[in-house]
Amino acid sequence: MSCRMNILRKLVTNAKPKLFIRKLVTLKTANEPTPMTVFDRKAKIIQKQRAAIAEDSSVYEYIKEEVGYRLSDRLFDIKRQFNLVVDLGCGYGHVSKHISIDNVKELIMCDICQEILNKAKNPEPEVKVSKIVVDEEKLPFENDSIDLIISCLNLHWVNNLPSTFLQIKNSLKNDGVFLGAMLAGDTLFELRSSLQLAGIERDGGIAPRISPFVRLRDVGALMQSAGFSMLTLDTDELIIRYPSMLELMWDLKGMGENNAVLQRPLRLNKNTMFSAAAIYEKLYGNNDEDSDTKGIPATFQVLYMIGWKPDPSQPKPLSRGSGQISIKDIGELDKIVKNLGKIET
């Protein structure tokens, strides 16, 4: 053992560090993806195409329909008419179909899959509409050209999220707004843990069968780093009930939301799948009180985000130390306001 260590020490001592590092970098660049490459984008396009050409594709859109409705409701809270709007990753028009001329004059509907664009529902006829195929990682829009960019449940498949946020911010005009929703946090944690436990039991290890989701606390930091101001983030949980894990996986495939991790295994062993279904039911299964039937829940955690491109006209926070009321007196706010008569805002 000591002889081997001496030989290794001599090799390391005699090596040329700069040349050695340069060779390693060259090999890694030539043969391996960059550290940001997590998802197989080509595979994701194929998955979306297969889902879109299915005759019953609309059956599996219930989650995106609900999130699209909730996201459009946030759009209506912004009391402004936008001249040019981009719906990035529009899907089948989950947000676009709710848009009216009162909010938007011209809409560009974008998706990475042409087959989905062909099925996407348009807003009301008064809104001018165009449809183009766009990769969310390479936005084609000119800087300072868009008033509003909407994104509904597509950014969780983006490899370089910081770059996409920066491109979105650059594409917006000053005082333009980005309104988005993405799956994040604990989405499908039940399915993930069940497949992991089954993989350990049947295959002797864990494989990446569920895509990783960005952590909630990181999104705000990424948007702030990209240059957005006046950030608003909130989360919502949709818990959908299925008869078993098999129906859940079938629906994910119908949505085009099946696994697209670059290092994913090519197949799921039948024994592992049935083992995971049994574990899922054992750990999370429960009875439906209305129908008295057994089933399993699946959690979809949705992060909603609003960010504005900075502009001098936007409100600014007061300088430090200019506050008139201490936070410890918040319980007596009415009495303090009455005594002071007026509070500067």
Image (tube, grey):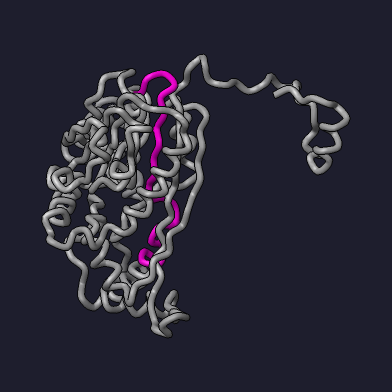
Total residue callouts: 0
Which is more toward the observer, 323 or 75?
Answer: 75
Q: Nearer the viewer, residue 46 or 26?
A: 46
Q: Which image quadrant: the N terminus? A: bottom left
Q: Residue furthest bottom?
A: 292
- Against 50, residue 344 (above or below) is above
The extreme front residue here reads 126
The answer to which of 35 and 103 lies nearer the viewer is: 103
Q: Nearer the viewer, residue 146 or 199?
A: 146
Query: Measured along the vertical axis of the image, is residue 142 above or below residue 336?
Result: above
Where residue 73 appears, x then y in whole percent? 43, 44
Decide if residue 165 is on the left or right side of residue 236.
Answer: left
Q: Which of the 4 image quarters holds residue 170?
A: top left
Residue at left offset 28%, top offset 37%: 88
The quarter of the picture where residue 26 lies is top left
Locate residue 169: give its quadrant: top left
Left or right of 217, for residue 82: left
User: Which percent across, then down, holds residue 141?
Assistant: 25, 24
Residue ID at (85%, 32%): 338
Q: Which residues are magenta?
A: 172-192
> In the drawing, does residue 117 fall left or right of residue 292?
left
Residue 131, percent across and down? 18, 35
